[in-house]
Image (cartoon, coloured by chain):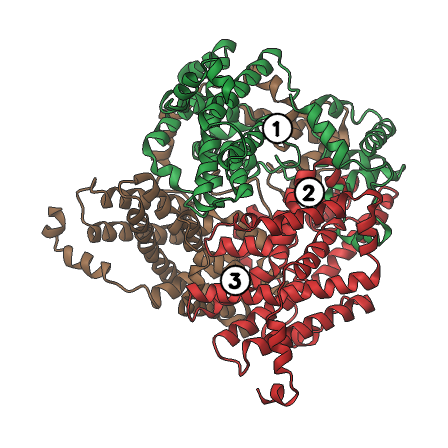
Chain colours: A brown, B green, C red
Amino acid sequence: MDLFTYLNLNELALGLSNLQMFPFFDSAHYIVSVMALREQPGALEVSRRSPLACWFSSMLYCFGGAVLSSMMMAEPPIAPLSNSTNVLLASFIWYLVFYCPQDLIYSSATILPLRLVLSGMKEVTRTWKVLGGVTQAQKKYKDGLLVMIAIGWAKGAGGGLISNFEQLVRGVWKPETNELLKMSYPTKVTLIGAVLFALQQSQYLPLQTHQLMLLYTVFIVLNKTRMMLLGSSSSPFAPVEAALYHALFARPAGYCLAPKHAETTSVKHQSALSRPISHSRGKDSLNGAAVAESDSPDHSIDPKEGSSSATNGKDQIKQKDQECSKKCD
Amino acid sequence: MDLFTYLNLNELALGLSNLQMFPFFDSAHYIVSVMALREQPGALEVSRRSPLACWFSSMLYCFGGAVLSSMMMAEPPIAPLSNSTNVLLASFIWYLVFYCPQDLIYSSATILPLRLVLSGMKEVTRTWKVLGGVTQAQKKYKDGLLVMIAIGWAKGAGGGLISNFEQLVRGVWKPETNELLKMSYPTKVTLIGAVLFALQQSQYLPLQTHQLMLLYTVFIVLNKTRMMLLGSSSSPFAPVEAALYHALFARPAGYCLAPKHAETTSVKHQSALSRPISHSRGKDSLNGAAVAESDSPDHSIDPKEGSSSATNGKDQIKQKDQECSKKCD
Amino acid sequence: MDLFTYLNLNELALGLSNLQMFPFFDSAHYIVSVMALREQPGALEVSRRSPLACWFSSMLYCFGGAVLSSMMMAEPPIAPLSNSTNVLLASFIWYLVFYCPQDLIYSSATILPLRLVLSGMKEVTRTWKVLGGVTQAQKKYKDGLLVMIAIGWAKGAGGGLISNFEQLVRGVWKPETNELLKMSYPTKVTLIGAVLFALQQSQYLPLQTHQLMLLYTVFIVLNKTRMMLLGSSSSPFAPVEAALYHALFARPAGYCLAPKHAETTSVKHQSALSRPISHSRGKDSLNGAAVAESDSPDHSIDPKEGSSSATNGKDQIKQKDQECSKKCD
């Protein structure tokens, strides 16, 4: 790419591509990952009840991508444990973040400038992981573009993709949500990276590996920094996503109901998801409906709603009906 | 087998065994599978919320057998993705079934004669998949009859066997049911096929491969057609199953309670399955019992019952008690 | 180790290390495992509803360690099925324990002296399994001490570690508990064994393999016998654990709440675990709260509590509040 030569960026890109992740960038990744775990609701309580479950959860946060991509490639998912140095480093950081006297480490690391630097460094490791996954897949499946994307994605965003099972280690089970149903920003940006690197490695992009590494790294670091500084969770891809969605997947309103055939054949399989609606149809099933709804998996629990839930059954049913009609829009 | 020679069926059988699955039979399999997904409750809603989760779910419906059997054999479960042509074909069909303008494709495919043909063609692919699984297992485990049966079954009925995890992709979690607890017809017929092909490959049956392929294919296609035309869900194996069950697994009534020792040691582990019964024992726990029961995982939700559920708590408890006593028979 | 020579124990140790597990010790392992399954709540009901699910569950009890360690090493998890003799033996025992006429086998095996002998013999197989796992891992990962411990542990205590998924086969799902969150005695003692054998195989211990086998076997058999005779579930490691916990993981009281930052960012992720507490805060949500609590996954169901649950909503809320405050201590 001539622009790189023109701007004398080639040397910078080459230098970046020779950067060693161990120990500094890896440490930053471990610190940010373990802190993310610690900030999960209930994680501190688990750290007191069972240090072992907490440690295992932390390792899944730190090495989840390697575990998931290994499983997808039928390589031993235990392999990350064989790299003793990295496991010991991650375990040491886990210990400091959770159990350090006076909570010194966690308190310091939450100071914004330090957290910014650490998060930036963690983002850098993402490039290496995605590229590692893509080349690992390419060795086994030449021309397997889809496999390369999948493995690159899994290696770069594994912690998020297996979050249901990571939570299970801590005794938390939230089946109603996962990273495929509602992708978080890191998962999205990793998917884009995996697509780009897979295209580049298959020589569909007019870029060399180190050039793409520079571009992608700069993009994800800048974007992460922007999001942290502005406290914004808005994704930079939102307009593109919305446009794609409307072009490809939008359908006219009123189309959301399954055709009659489907309804009649599948009544007995009626899922937990559709329970509240069927219950609230019967206006006289006051308490029954109210409670069943507060149990249904597809409503995230809102404490305010919970406290008001028994004040008036009829009110709540109206409210729920409104929710249901909103959903059908 | 002389009968085959006598009826001049050998050539037909050989012709059938040389049939190519790609593209027509594979396409029929993808169409029927994706339509089955679309008819799941909540699937259309997922297709609007997250096309990616919907796509991934569809791929599990189409390639679930290959994924499951690969995992059982420690081969890369990602391998089906490396067959780009088939994945693109399945993705194209997924798109048409879910997002086609005016819903043309789905509407046409639900017309009975077309659906009959597609379902028949899908059944044909089952023979190939079961046989593929059995021979794949035989390569690694000579004389491993049980492994051959397991892999043949997994490859032919994988989508059903992993349905709990496929549902999880869509945010649905129904732990109280799985294909082992309550086998559906396709799972049963695939198991029988896996047993037959494993016996045949181990030369315990006086049949050649192409002869068994013809017999099994004719049986499953005819039976599927019969079931669709009559709208009957009755399995042709029901009498055999009932006889086997009574011969092997029946026990005198009253024996269903665990011995005292077990009860006392395991009270604290009392499972979700046993909740409704324990609740309804207390006659005065009116609303509590009623609602707990409508939430209980081992009752499939019946909308009629749901609407009447709050009319009279006592009535419902009586009704439930009857259900419970029926269960104990 | 001179003590061994001094006490003439070397020959005993060598003799023990040459002991064949098949068929007697393996049979004892299968009997005790299947009996443990049968004593799970709901297992008998499953054995009547679906013998196949019951059989599969039994196999996971008997071969869970082999399945789990295979998956961790990317070896076929189906492999235990290829050992027909052992599978047939285990299946035969499964049949006798669950379906024997007059329930003869189960009734006899629950007689204390016989159960003592069987449990002791089962413990002996633990030594062999842990050592098998450690050496299996050592072949692939020389010097991978952590991998050796993990595989040894998985092979020796696999049935417990995968219990969440074994329960799922039976339609039971208890995400709020697992062996990492709250280790049972067998899981603990297996972990200790895995650490010891891994250290020994890496030559960090001044012992030979057969000597450690003797010591470990004697310890686990004696300890199991003691626990069964006294009916005590107190672990012999409790003091060591408590000391370690206080030295490494204890933190001052009042520190259990997450910092404000974490709380505000994670409200929307509020987990299922915290539901009951948030509900019971609203004093006026009488029935709603009561029933929601009886459904909540982190309370094991107590039938007595269930029958009293609807007598007085307010009482129950008080009771629950007390429980919650106890938990926060």
Closest to the observer: B308 or B210? B210
- The answer to whether mark 1 and mark 3 are in CB contact below 8 A is no
Label 3 residue SS = helix
Residue B126 horizontal side relative to residue C157, left or right: left
**Residue A54 sits in quarter:** bottom right
Label 1 residue SS = loop
Q: Is residue A41 visible?
A: no
Label 3 sits on residue: C151
Label 1 sits on residue: B184
* Label 1: chain letter: B
**Residue A312 sits in quarter:** top right
* Label 3: chain letter: C
Label 2 sits on residue: C54
Identify the amino acid type marked 1.
Ser
Identify the amino acid type marked 2.
Cys
**Residue C159 sits in quarter:** bottom right
**Residue occupying image coordinates x 57% and y 42%:** A175
Residue B249 x %, y %: 75, 37
- The answer to whether mark 2 and mark 3 are in CB contact below 8 A is no
* Label 2: chain letter: C
**Which mark is on residue C86?**
none
Is C267 placed above or below A50 here?
above
Identify the amino acid type marked 3.
Ile
**Residue occupying image coordinates x 58% and y 76%:** C210
Residue C2 x %, y %: 59, 89
